[in-house]
Image (tube, grey):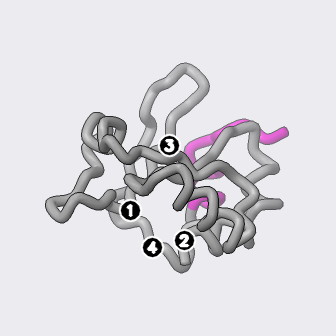
Amino acid sequence: MQCKALRDSAREIQSFDVAYFMASVDTLEDNTAFAKEHEAGFPILADPSKAMSTAYGVLGSRGFDNRWTYYIDADGIVLKIDKETNPATAGVDLTRTMEELGFPKI
């Protein structure tokens, strides 16, 4: 659902001068198949070792990532962490928050 929401908001998201992606603890092969099946126009990073998920603090107690959204500026400063990401509205929410935070547009 979150992948679809981001896919459906691609035009609006890509009007900002940003890079965006999803990440999961699944394998590269699983993420590649998932991205293809859902026609994702953005990368889905594979973290089967769970090193990145652990470093960002998103690894849940059951071994899967929490659905958090990190807003990081061009200088690498974390401006916001949305720990209440709604998969169904993730694309619209992402665009609205980037606007509120003043992310540059292309």
Amino acid, disc 2: Gln
Q: Nearer the viewer, mark 1 or mark 3?
A: 1
SS at badge 3: strand
Relative image position of residue 65 (x, y in whole percent): 33, 57
Instruction: Provide the residue designation for mark 1.
Output: 67
Q: What's under tag 4, amino acid-wise?
A: Asn
Q: Which residue corresponds to mark 4?
A: 86
Mark toward the viewer: 4 or 2: 2
Q: Is the magenta stretch mostly helix, strand or loop?
A: helix
Provide the residue designation for mark 2. Answer: 2
Going from the N terminus, do you reach mark 4 or mark 2 first?
A: 2
**Residue shown at 54% from the left, 53% from the top:** 22
Question: Vertical placement of 91 versus 28: above or below?
Answer: below
CB-based contact (under 8 Å), mark 2 and mark 1: yes
Q: Where is residue 24 in the image (x, y as percent from the top left)?
A: 43, 54
Question: Alpha-carbon distance for marks 1 and 3?
Answer: 13 Å
Q: How crowded is mark 4: few (under 14 residues within 10 Å), some or many (20 or more)?
A: some
Element assignment for label 1 = loop
Does residue 13 appear left or right of residue 3 in this picture? right
* Pointer 1 with pointer 3, Cβ within 8 A: no
Tag count in the figure?
4
Q: Which residue is drawn at 53% across and 61% down?
A: 30
Taking depth in this image into account, of 16 and 102 the one nearest to the observer is 16
Please state which of residues 32 and 23 is positioned toward the viewer in this rendering.
32
Q: Which amino acid does label 3 sit on?
A: Tyr
Crowding around mark 2 (Cα neighbors within 10 Å: few <14, some 14 to 19, many 20+) is some
Chain part drawn in magenta: 94-106
Quickly name the residue at label 3. Answer: 71
Q: Is residue 101 magenta?
A: yes
